[in-house]
Every structure is written in C-alpha cells, then in structure tokens.
Amino acid sequence: MKKILLLSLILFVQQAFCQTPIKVEPIGQGNPILFLPGFTTPGSIWKETISKLDNPYEAHVVSYAGFNGIEPIGTPWYAPIKQALIDYISKEELTNLTIIGHSMGGNLATELAAELNDRVTGLILVDAIPCMRELMMPGVAASSLQYDSPYNNQMLGMPDDAFKNTALMMARNMTNSEDKIELIASWSVAADRETYVYGYTDLLKLDLRPVLEDIKVETLILGATFPTREMTQQTFDKQYANLGNKTIALADDSKHFIMFDQPEWFYAQVNQYLDKNAQ
C-alpha cells in the first residue's frame, strides 16, 4: 500500500510540473498495437516495422522520459512508466490489444499482459529477458543494487568522450549492421545521463519470472542467436519456464537489434503471428 501511495504521489508531482513518463504517437486505424522500444531507444525505431505490416492497425508508438529529447522524470523511473502505460491504455479504451516490446519494452509488455488480461490479446517479446540481473550477475539480490553506487557514480562522472566510446563499444555488441552502430550509440549519448544510469539500475532490479504465470495470451518470443544459438535457446527456455503458452523463434546471424540484422525474417514473424492471432 505504501508503494502504491508513493507512486501515486510521484505521478501527481510529475503531472503538476508537466512532466510525463511517456509520449505516445498514434498512427493509422484498425485493431490497436502498442509498440514499446528498448532502453534509450526512440519509438521511431518501430516505424519501419509498422510500414511492413500486412494489414492495417492502429499503432501506438511509445517513447520514454529522459530519452529521445523528452524531459526526464527522475527516480524511480521504470515504475512510473509502467503506470503511465496502464493509464494510457485505460484512457484510450484500448481493447483487443497486441503489445510488441523490444528489450526493456518487452519487460513492460510482460507486466502489462499479466495485469491487463481482459484487454491484451496478443504479445510479442523481442530479445527481452524477464530477469536481466540473473543473467548478468547470477545470485546478486535486487536489494543490493542502489542508485548511489561506485559504478553509477563513475558513469555519472564519465567525460562525454569516454561515455561516447563506451556507448559505441556497447552498440557493436548489439547489432551486426555496421551502418546502425553510430545510431544506436547516439541514443545513449543523447540520453539524460541520470536517466541512463539510474534507469538501468531499475531494470536490473526487475524479476518478472513469477508474473509469467499470469499471462494467458499466446506469446511469441523472438531471440537473437548471439553469441550462440545453443546459449540463447537455453537462456530463453530457463527464463520463460513459467510462461505456458509460448513459441520461441531465433534469428540466425543476429544480435540484440533483430529488426536491423534480420529485418525480413523479423517482419515475417510479426505478420505471421498477427495473422494467426487476428480476432
């Protein structure tokens, strides 16, 4: 109850000062699809996917506070975004809703599908992991991760040139498409630095494996085969063990941004799911 009251107070203060956790761009008409990008990524990454859909849909393209030139909201960061999405879905009276989320967007999509079973009828998760902490730092408790930490303070104080080099190094591990590396890095460089640092701490605290049991809709999970297909398959099988109604499909020769590395495969998978899941 205290957490709910605190979150409500945070949202009230944000609204009072015209801060918004999300911005949403509606596109087209038809059954609704909510498009959720990953961490630092602008909603515009979904424009190409939308243009490749076989049938007309009402796309709701989301971008997050602190990224893509949107005013930051401070901390906590992830929880207000999730609540803002729930409020948006309710306000817009979205039903028969499909949610497509990449990376962190997949985490949000997972939570929305678990909590809004009466509204969500489709779910596509793109290279998203329910508990990144367990994958990146096995055995580390969420309670041990704090905003005020030596690593976070180092990232906050890092000179811009060094931060850009770090962003470029990370981007090279996220795509095989050389022409997209600078673009991916630029999203991190342009981000509000505190949102980048503290928002990632919020993500590392997440463990959505228990809520997977609450998801009833048939779910398509798309994964990249980097570093190997075998490792990816094992990771997804383990992380999504609690999700009953699922299909896992892996894109060969792909890193994290599957829509960049294997676009035609990606569009085909999305369209096949949407056609099969049409209500």
Image (cartoon, rainbow, N blue to C red):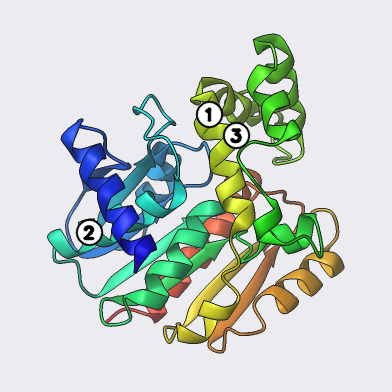
User: Residue 251 occupies which quadrant of the picture?
Assistant: bottom right
Q: Is residue 176 left or right of residue 31?
A: right
Which residue is label 1 attached to?
Answer: 194
CA gap between label 1 and label 2 equals 25 Å
CA gap between label 1 and label 3 equals 5 Å
- Whether residue 244 appears in this view of the structure is yes
Residue type, numbered disc 3: Val
| Identity of the residue drawn at 42% across and 52% down | 36
- Whether residue 271 appears in this view of the structure is no
Query: Quadrant location of the N terminus?
Result: bottom left
N-terminal label among 1 and 2: 2
Question: As rendered, which of 232 and 49 lies closer to the eye?
Answer: 232
Residue type, numbered disc 1: Glu
Disc 2 crowd rating (10 Å Cα; few below 14, some 14-19, many 20+) is few
Q: What number is the disc on residue 174?
A: none
Query: Quadrant location of the C terminus?
Result: bottom left
Q: Secondary structure at mark 1?
A: helix
Which residue is label 2 attached to?
Answer: 87
232 is higher (above) or lower (below) than 260: below
Which residue is label 3 attached to?
Answer: 197
| Identity of the residue drawn at 72% across and 62% down | 141
Disc 1 crowd rating (10 Å Cα; few below 14, some 14-19, many 20+) is some
Q: Secondary structure at mark 2?
A: helix
N-terminal label among 2 and 3: 2
Residue type, numbered disc 2: Asp
